[in-house]
Image (tube, rainbow, N blue to C red):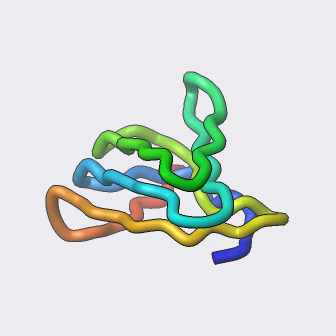
């Protein structure tokens, strides 16, 4: 996936992401994280954030959730 950060939003369920290739970017009120190959990040359900593949490198990642995936855009 090669794109910039997504819209500000939340997910109902927790999400776990492991980056396989490239870089995954995650940003919330606590700051921004860049997650590289072999690294892991947990996105808690209900936490407002932006995320997505790095605009230059893109990102290939494995994602698992505690329930059905959704994206709830914030207003």
Q: Which quarter of the picture shows residue 63?
A: bottom left
Q: Is residue 5 left or right of residue 40?
A: right
Residue 12 on image: x %, y %:
26, 54
Q: Is residue 24 left or right of residue 45?
A: right
Taking the view exactly as shown, the residue that stands out farthest to the bottom is: 1
Taking the view exactly as shown, the residue that stands out farthest to the front is: 38
Residue 11 on image: x %, y %:
34, 55
Q: Residue at x 43, y 45 (%)?
A: 40
Residue 56 on image: x %, y %:
84, 65
Q: Residue at x 28, y 69 (%)?
A: 69
Q: Is residue 5 above or below residue 59?
A: above
Q: Is residue 8 above or below residue 2?
A: above
- Quick one: 38 or 50, which is closer to the camera? 38
Taking the view exactly as shown, the residue that stands out farthest to the left is: 67
Q: Which quarter of the picture shows residue 21?
A: bottom right
Q: Residue at x 31, y 53 (%)?
A: 15
Q: The N terminus appears in which quarter of the rendering? A: bottom right
Q: Is residue 48 left or right of residue 34?
A: left
* Total count of labels: 0
Q: Which quarter of the picture shows residue 34?
A: top right
- Quick one: 39 or 65, which is closer to the camera? 39
Q: Residue at x 73, y 70 (%)?
A: 3
Taking the view exactly as shown, the residue that stands out farthest to the right is: 56
């Amino acid at each position: 996936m090669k794109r910039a950060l997504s819209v500000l939003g939340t997910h109902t369920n927790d999400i776990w992401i492991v980056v396989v290739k490239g870089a995954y970017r995650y940003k919330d009120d606590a700051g921004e994280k860049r997650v590289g190959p072999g690294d892991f990040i947990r996105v808690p359900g209900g936490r407002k954030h932006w995320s997505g593949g790095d605009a230059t490198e893109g990102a290939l990642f494995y994602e698992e959730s505690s329930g059905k995936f959704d994206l709830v855009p914030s207003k």
